[in-house]
């Protein structure tokens, strides 16, 4: 039995490098190159393992980049199952411009899946035994909302508690089926409800609506540097981030999800799991580049949040 099974239909071989300055036409010389296996579910599995949980990652891969991807996943020492596809796994590029302290991120849409490949992926889900099942990251190009809905249905069939970290029509489809926990950021929540949510009351209302309509038992809205908001049938809770020196917020959302789910899988109460998520998100912001979060940072920040004591709930 795994603590957390993650499902990644469109993983990415993440390539990172740095340049003195990114300019057109001239060759931009790069240094500090590194490759990481990425995509929402893969990042979540990496952090679950970092925090001492037992993850299983299921992903679709193909082509030479898919082989390299699988070799990189192997280095992270967690169980994983690859569903082979005919298309080439995507390669994402981030170039950090040192002069302007800006990241340029190039993210391909990735391969489409054939009907048989979808079926193979869905069949793989059914054999996964885990306390929590997480669907995270973008879905394959042109797959439409039906695939997301079907993935969530199969996840539910395994008996696991389902978690969705998705955007656009995939997010809507997952909520239509119903999940235990959903983690939108503000942009994703605004797109879902079809309007801007400038005030805390607007955001509280939108989160509560998801709970009241049965889309999710728990909504964790992450607000980047502003912190996060938790909504359940018991009410709404808000947390600001512990003060940290921010290096790169890449992977903060995935770290948040992984930590919250690890704590829930350990039987911790929802409020506490939420605080652990905020600690991991802030810890991810402390690490440079594509590095996710470190366990020692997460524990230290979590202690700080607990000592401060979370604010009370509001309806
Ligand atoms: N600049 C920051 N400083 C401190 N904490 C941060 C910062 N950015 C993010 N976090 C923490 O991480 C959590 C998740 O971050 P965020 O809301 O940016 O997720 P996201 O938009 O899903 O990110 P991702 O790009 O990884 O998908 C936040 O709720 C917050 O607790
Ligand atoms: Mg996110």
Image (cartoon, rainbow, N blue to C red):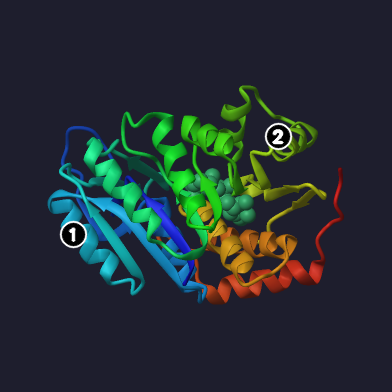
Farthest left residue in view:
64
User: Residue 31: horizontal and vertical position, in percent?
Assistant: 24, 58
Is residue 249 among the parts visible in the rendering?
no
Residue 8 relative to residue 231: left or right: left
Name the element at disc 2.
Answer: loop
Q: Residues within 10 Å of mark 2 (few under 14, many from 20)?
A: few
Q: In this view, does 261 lie above or below 27?
A: below
Identify which residue is drawn at 68% across, 39% down.
Answer: 214
Farthest top residue in view:
194
Ligand 1 under 8 Å from disc 1 Cβ = no
- Distance, label 1 to label 2, CA atoms, is 43 Å
Q: Name the residue under label 2.
A: 213
User: Residue 14: horizontal and vertical position, in percent?
Assistant: 29, 53
Marks 1 & 2, CB-CB < 8 Å contact: no
Report the front residue among 12 and 163.
163
In which quadrant of the rendered view does residue 275 lie?
bottom right
Identify which residue is drawn at 71% across, 60% down.
Answer: 270
Q: Is residue 104 above or below residue 311?
A: above
Identify which residue is drawn at 63% across, 65% down.
Answer: 264
Q: Mark 1 points at which residue?
A: 68
Report the front residue among 186 and 177.
177
């Amino acid at each position: 039995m795994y603590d957390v099974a993650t499902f990644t239909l469109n993983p990415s071989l993440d390539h990172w490098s740095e340049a003195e300055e990114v300019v057109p036409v001239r060759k931009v010389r790069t240094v500090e190159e590194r490759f990481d296996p990425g995509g929402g579910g893969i990042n979540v599995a990496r952090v679950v393992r970092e925090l001492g949980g037992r993850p299983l990652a299921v992903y679709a891969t193909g082509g030479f980049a898919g082989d390299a991807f699988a070799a990189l996943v192997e280095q992270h020492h967690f169980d994983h199952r690859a569903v082979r596809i005919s298309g080439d796994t995507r390669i994402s590029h981030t170039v950090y411009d040192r002069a302007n302290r800006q990241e340029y991120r190039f993210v391909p849409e990735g391969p489409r899946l054939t009907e048989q490949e979808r079926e193979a992926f869905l069949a793989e889900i059914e054999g996964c035994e885990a306390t929590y099942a997480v669907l995270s990251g973008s879905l394959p190009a042109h797959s439409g909302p039906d695939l997301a809905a079907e993935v969530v249905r199969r996840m539910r069939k395994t008996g696991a508690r389902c978690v969705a970290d998705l955007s656009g029509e995939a997010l809507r489809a997952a909520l239509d089926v119903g999940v235990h926990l959903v983690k939108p950021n503000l942009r994703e929540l605004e797109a879902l409800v079809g309007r801007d949510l400038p005030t805390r009351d607007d955001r509280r209302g939108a989160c509560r609506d998801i709970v009241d309509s049965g889309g999710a038992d728990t909504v964790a809205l992450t607000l980047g540097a502003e912190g996060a908001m938790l909504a359940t049938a018991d009410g709404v809770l808000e947390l600001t981030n512990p003060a940290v020196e921010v290096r790169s917020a890449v992977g903060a959302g995935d770290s948040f999800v992984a930590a919250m789910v690890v704590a829930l899988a350990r039987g911790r109460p929802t409020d506490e799991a939420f605080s652990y998520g905020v600690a991991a998100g802030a810890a991810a912001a402390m690490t440079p580049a594509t590095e996710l979060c470190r366990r020692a940072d997460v524990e230290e920040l979590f202690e700080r949040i607990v000592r401060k004591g979370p604010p009370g709930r509001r309806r």
